[in-house]
């Protein structure tokens, strides 16, 4: 399980992308926005997207997102099954308020978790 945000686990940082690529960080966008996705696709940096709907989930993977972030448990469960069935390249991360909820991520079958505070 991938764990982003624990102070003892060394991971890449996430940075909110608005219009300027952050070098050596995982650029993330909070909503599905095709104009921002185009810019991220042109960069050589890793990127992530928060999705709110099933269609956005499939599109995010097809468009090359390295990470798909979800805070809805029902959608996260659906995403983990879709990712396994369709062999997604994107990693599915559940957004958590605290790391005391790791078992929930395991039960949902996601690739990992990210602390909400780690996203800034």
Image (cartoon, helix red, strand yellow):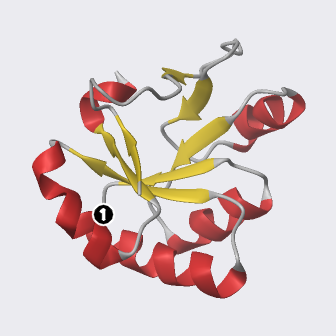
The image quadrant where one finds the N terminus is: bottom left
x and y, in percent, of residue 70 in the image: 40, 56
Q: Residues within 10 Å of mark 1 (few under 14, many from 20)?
A: few
Vertically, is 49 above or below 53?
Answer: above
x and y, in percent, of residue 101 in the image: 15, 56
| Residue at the spot of label 1 | 72
Give the left or right position of residue 43, taking residue 118 as reference: right
Give the left or right position of residue 75, taking residue 14 as reference: left
Give the left or right position of residue 62, taking residue 82 as reference: right
At x 70%, y 61%, the residue is: 61
Q: Report which quarter residue 9 is drawn in.
A: top left
The image quadrant where one finds the C terminus is: top left
At x 21%, y 58%, the residue is: 102
The outermost residue toward the left is: 100
At x 67%, y 57%, the residue is: 60
At x 79%, y 55%, the residue is: 63
The outermost residue toward the right is: 42
Vertically, is 52 above or below 95?
Answer: below
Vertically, is 102 above or below 53?
Answer: above
x and y, in percent, of residue 82 in the image: 57, 81
Tally the marks. 1
Q: Secondary structure at mark 1?
A: loop
x and y, in percent, of residue 57 in the image: 58, 65
Give the left or right position of residue 112, taking residue 90 as reference: left
């Amino acid at each position: 399980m991938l764990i982003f945000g624990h102070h003892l686990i060394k991971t890449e940082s996430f940075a909110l992308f608005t219009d300027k690529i952050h070098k050596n960080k995982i650029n993330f966008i909070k909503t599905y926005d095709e104009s921002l996705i185009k810019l991220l696709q042109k960069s050589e940096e890793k990127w992530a997207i928060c999705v709110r709907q099933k269609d956005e989930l499939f599109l995010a993977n097809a468009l090359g997102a390295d990470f798909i972030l979800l805070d809805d448990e029902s959608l996260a469960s659906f995403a983990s099954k879709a990712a396994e069935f369709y062999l997604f390249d994107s990693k599915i991360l559940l957004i958590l308020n605290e790391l005391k909820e790791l078992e929930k991520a395991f039960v949902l079958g996601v690739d990992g978790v990210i602390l909400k505070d780690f996203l800034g």
